[in-house]
C-alpha cells in the first residue's frame, strides 16, 4: 500500500488560549499515520497565555507538534510563516476555532493527489455558542464561514472556493505562485478576508484545479459576539474592501467597475426589499458598497496587479463572469457569495 504524502497542518492563533488546546486535540486525533504529518502552531504575537498553551501542547506531543512565533501581525503573514516552516508536501490550514472530522486530512491529501489539483477544501459546519437571535437570517450564514456544497466532489471556479478555516494546498502551489497576500486576511481589528480566495484564483488562472472534497469536514465555533448586528455590518464592510482588492489585482479598472456595479445592485435590491429581510440587510449592503469603494481606491495605489506566467493580459473570464452571476432583477433578491 502506498504511503500517504507527508502533510503539515498549520494552525495560526492570536489570543485564543481558551479554544486552542481543544482545536489542537481535535487535529491530533485525525485518522492519518502519525509519522506522516506534523502540527505547526503559529502564534501571532498573542498577549494572553496562548503561547504558553501552544508550548504545553508541543511538550505533550514531542516530535509531532512545533510552535513558531510570527512577529508581523496579520493572518496572511502568520500563514506564510507556516508555509515557510512546513516540511509537508501537503500544507493544510485550520482555524484555531475549527475542529476537523477524523477523515479530514486523509480526504484532503487524496484530493490533492489528483492530477492538476493544487488546492482543496471541504464543508464548514457551524457550532454556535448561543441561540441565534430572532432577527438572524440564513443569508448571513456565509459571513460566518458556513459552507457546504453537498455530498459530491466538485471542481471549483471563482468565486466559489474553499474557506480559510478548512483548506489545503500542494507545496508546489506556493513555490510556483507565492503565498497569501498580506493586503487580505484578518489583521488586528480588521475583518478583511479572502486571502485564500485570491490565492485560489491565482492557481485557477494559471491552469491549476481547485477541488471541493465533501469528506474533509470541520466544525467551526461561532462566538456569540459574531452574531450581533454591529459585527455583521463590520463584516460586510470588510468583505467589500476584500473583494475590491481582488477585483483590482486580477481585473484592473474594468474589474473594479464590474464589482462596483454588483455592489450597487445588491445595495439597491436590499433597500427595495426591506420588508422581506429587515433594515439590517440594507445596512449591511450599504456597508459592503462603502467598503468596496474605499478598498478599490486604496488598492489603486497600494496593490500590484497579478498576471499568470505567459498571460496575454486578456481579462480573466471568471472574474468578469461575476457580472452575470451577481446581476439582480429588482426588486428581487440578490445572489450573495461571501467568502472567508
Image (cartoon, helix red, strand yellow):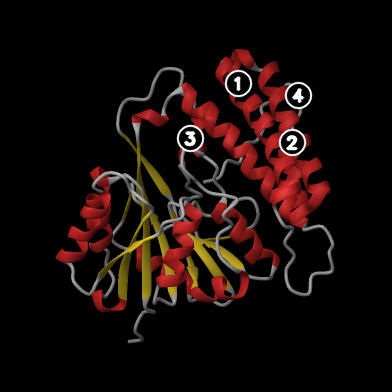
Measure how far apart labels 2 and 4 are at the Cα level: 12 Å
Q: Quick check: can you spot residue 161?
A: no
Residue that sits furthest to the left in the current view: 60
The answer to whether marks 2 and 4 mark residues whose Cβ atoms lie closer than 8 Å is: no
The answer to whether marks 2 and 3 mark residues whose Cβ atoms lie closer than 8 Å is: no
Q: Position of residue 244 (x, y in %)?
A: 69, 43
Residue that sits furthest to the bottom in the current view: 1
Question: At numbered mark 3, what does the secondary structure look like: helix, strand or loop?
Answer: helix
Residue at position x 60%, y 21% in the image: 283
Lower position in the chain sequence, tag 3 or tag 1 = 3
Q: Which residue is mark 3?
A: 141
Q: Which residue is mark 4?
A: 330
Measure how far apart labels 4 and 1 are at the Cα level: 18 Å
Q: State which mark lies toward you, 4 or 3.
A: 3
Q: Residues within 10 Å of mark 4 (few under 14, many from 20)?
A: some
Lower position in the chain sequence, tag 4 or tag 3 = 3
Left or right: where does residue 152 sit relative to residue 197? Answer: left
Q: Name above or below for residue 230 compared with residue 155.
A: above
Q: Which residue is mark 2?
A: 262
Q: Which residue is mark 1?
A: 283
Q: Name above or below for residue 164 compared with residue 179.
A: above
Q: Position of residue 171 (x, y in %)?
A: 49, 74
Q: Residues within 10 Å of mark 3 (few under 14, many from 20)?
A: some
Between 310 and 337, the one nearer to me in the picture: 310
Q: Name above or below for residue 115 compared with residue 131.
A: below
Between 294 and 199, the one nearer to me in the picture: 294
Lower position in the chain sequence, tag 4 or tag 1 = 1
Amino acid at each position: 500500500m502506498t504511503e500517504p504524502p507527508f502533510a503539515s497542518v498549520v494552525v495560526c492563533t492570536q489570543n485564543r488560549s481558551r479554544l486552542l488546546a481543544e482545536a489542537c486535540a481535535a487535529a491530533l486525533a485525525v485518522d492519518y499515520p502519525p509519522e506522516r504529518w506534523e502540527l505547526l502552531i503559529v502564534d501571532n504575537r498573542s498577549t494572553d497565555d496562548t503561547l504558553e498553551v501552544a508550548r504545553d501542547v508541543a511538550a505533550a506531543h514531542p516530535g509531532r507538534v512545533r510552535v513558531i512565533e510570527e512577529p508581523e501581525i496579520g493572518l496572511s503573514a502568520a500563514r506564510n510563516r507556516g508555509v515557510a516552516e512546513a516540511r509537508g508536501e501537503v500544507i493544510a490550514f485550520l482555524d484555531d476555532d475549527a475542529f476537523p472530522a477524523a477523515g479530514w486530512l486523509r480526504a484532503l491529501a487524496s484530493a490533492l493527489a489528483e492530477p492538476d489539483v493544487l488546492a482543496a477544501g471541504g464543508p464548514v459546519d457551524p457550532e454556535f455558542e448561543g441561540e441565534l437571535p430572532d432577527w438572524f437570517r440564513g443569508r448571513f450564514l456565509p459571513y460566518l464561514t458556513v459552507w457546504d456544497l453537498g455530498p459530491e466532489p466538485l471542481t471549483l471556479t471563482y468565486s466559489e472556493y474553499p474557506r480559510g478555516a478548512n483548506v489545503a494546498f500542494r507545496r508546489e502551489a506556493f513555490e510556483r505562485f507565492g503565498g497569501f497576500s498580506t493586503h487580505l486576511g484578518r489583521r488586528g481589528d480588521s475583518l478583511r478576508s479572502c486571502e485564500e480566495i485570491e490565492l485560489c484564483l491565482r492557481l485557477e488562472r494559471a491552469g491549476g484545479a481547485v477541488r471541493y472534497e465533501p469528506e474533509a469536514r470541520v466544525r467551526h465555533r461561532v462566538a456569540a459576539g459574531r452574531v450581533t448586528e454591529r459585527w455583521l455590518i463590520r463584516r460586510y464592510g470588510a468583505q467589500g474592501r476584500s473583494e475590491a482588492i481582488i477585483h483590482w489585482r486580477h481585473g484592473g479598472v474594468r474589474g473594479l467597475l464590474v464589482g462596483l456595479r454588483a455592489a450597487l445592485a445588491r445595495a439597491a435590491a436590499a433597500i427595495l426589499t426591506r420588508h422581506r429581510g429587515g433594515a439590517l440587510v440594507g445596512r449591511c449592503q450599504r456597508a459592503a458598497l462603502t467598503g468596496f469603494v474605499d478598498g478599490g481606491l486604496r488598492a489603486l495605489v497600494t496593490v500590484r496587479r497579478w498576471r499568470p506566467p505567459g498571460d496575454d493580459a486578456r481579462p480573466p473570464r471568471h472574474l468578469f463572469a461575476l457580472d452575470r452571476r451577481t446581476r439582480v432583477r429588482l426588486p428581487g433578491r440578490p445572489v450573495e457569495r461571501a467568502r472567508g
